[in-house]
Amino acid sequence: MAQSSSNGQDKSSNTYEALNKIGRGAYGTVYKARDKQTGQEVALKKVCIPLSEDGIPMNTLREIALLKQLNAYDHPNIVKLLDICHGQQIGKDLMMFLVFEHVEQDLAMYIEKHTKGFKTTEIRNLSKQIVHGVDFLHSNRIVHRDLKPQNLLVTSDGHIKLADFGLAKTYDFEMKLTSVVVTLWYRSPEILLGLPYSTAVDIWSIGCIIVELFTRKPLFCGKSENEQLNEILRVLGKPPKDEWPAKNAPIKWSSFDINEKVDIKSIAPSMCENVLSLVMNMLTFDPNKRITALEALNHEYFLEEPINT
């Protein structure tokens, strides 16, 4: 299916055989595949690279170098990149394949399996691993932008690995994400409002995911940008008009009339005060006031004594 590119692993003659499609997202199609040499099962992500007059664009080469550099750290909470391959050229596009370790389940499946919920210690362990992985990406100037349970893989022994970041993101950076392709539910207010954004968008998503680990269902479930913002404001409250960040955006402050405010504690009553504090620092409407991943790792929630319930 794909011929390996030279990647320092002496696998230039190796090929991968696709077994079945795992899924399709905004950033390409992912297949479960087999390494024909070793029999190892892998995840094969198909990415379309627009070629320039000089061939593969320099920014693509830089992204490949960065992915390989990140891989050298062998971070426990980042899915391992095994190979980068090139496929056929179609017109002015080159098909590339990112080959990752294959993990059987994602966090959405993991949550669904745990019909009776999680112990508080397990929620804290899973949450801390997610923050660790995001802190690693942010420290290397990578914003994930699409953190959600489907992009967090869970190994058979309960370890979290962040997936779906890096090379595939670069080429769609200007693409307007649609609710058809990527869920709105974990998206921060600044993205919904069409504003510039940075690493704080990932922190917002983590806050949503932590609450979901307690409730086993998504926190904000809008079907459009407006509806999603309305769901968010029902919990956080509506900011004063002079603090509305999108004064020139199509979505206006006056569009929202919040009558029934919901306290997050009533949504997830089993959350202790420390995790509630952390979550509310993540779900801050103003991204400049949101906690960073490094600050989150030093939050009291992750430093308190274990609770065995």
Image (spheres, rainbow, N blue to C red):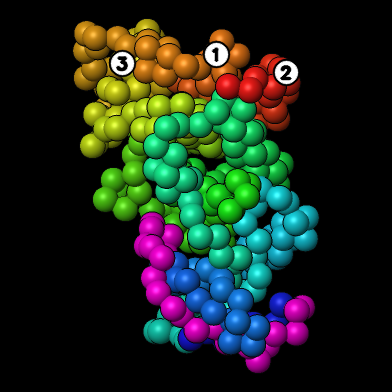
Q: Is residue 61 magenta?
A: no
Considering depth in this image, is 173 or 83 the residue closer to the camera?
83
Considering depth in this image, is 234 or 157 the residue closer to the camera?
157
Q: Residues within 10 Å of mark 1 (few under 14, many from 20)?
A: few
In the image, which is nearer the foreground, mark 3 or mark 2? 2
Rounded to the nearest angstrom, the CA distance separating label 3 from label 2 is 33 Å
Question: Which type of secondary structure does the marked residue at label 1 adopt?
Answer: loop
- Give the answer, above or below, for where 109 lies relative to 6: above
Q: Tell me if 189 is positioned left or right of 147 in this view.
A: left
Query: Which residues are the magenta region?
Result: 8-28
Q: Tell me if 154 is positioned left or right of 73 in this view.
A: left
**Residue to which mark 3 is pinned:** 234
Q: Earlier in the sequence, mark 1 or mark 2?
A: 1
* Amino acid type, label 1: Cys
Image location of residue 203, percent across then percent down: 55, 32
Say which residue appears at 57% left-offset and 18% top-offset. 275
**Residue to which mark 2 is pinned:** 305
Q: Tell me if 199 is positioned left or right of 132 in this view.
A: left
* Amino acid type, label 3: Arg
Image location of residue 206, percent across then percent down: 52, 33
Considering depth in this image, is 106 or 168 the residue closer to the camera?
106
**Residue to which mark 1 is pinned:** 272
Q: Residues within 10 Å of mark 2 (few under 14, many from 20)?
A: few
Rounded to the nearest angstrom, the CA distance separating label 1 from label 3 is 21 Å
- Give the answer, above or below, for where 13 lies relative to 68: below
Q: Are marks 3 and 2 in contact (CB under 8 Å)?
A: no
Q: Which mark is residue 23?
A: none
Question: Which type of secondary structure does the marked residue at label 2 adopt?
Answer: loop
Q: Residues within 10 Å of mark 3 (few under 14, many from 20)?
A: many
Rounded to the nearest angstrom, the CA distance separating label 1 from label 2 is 13 Å
Question: Which type of secondary structure does the marked residue at label 3 adopt?
Answer: helix
Image location of residue 251, percent across then percent down: 27, 27
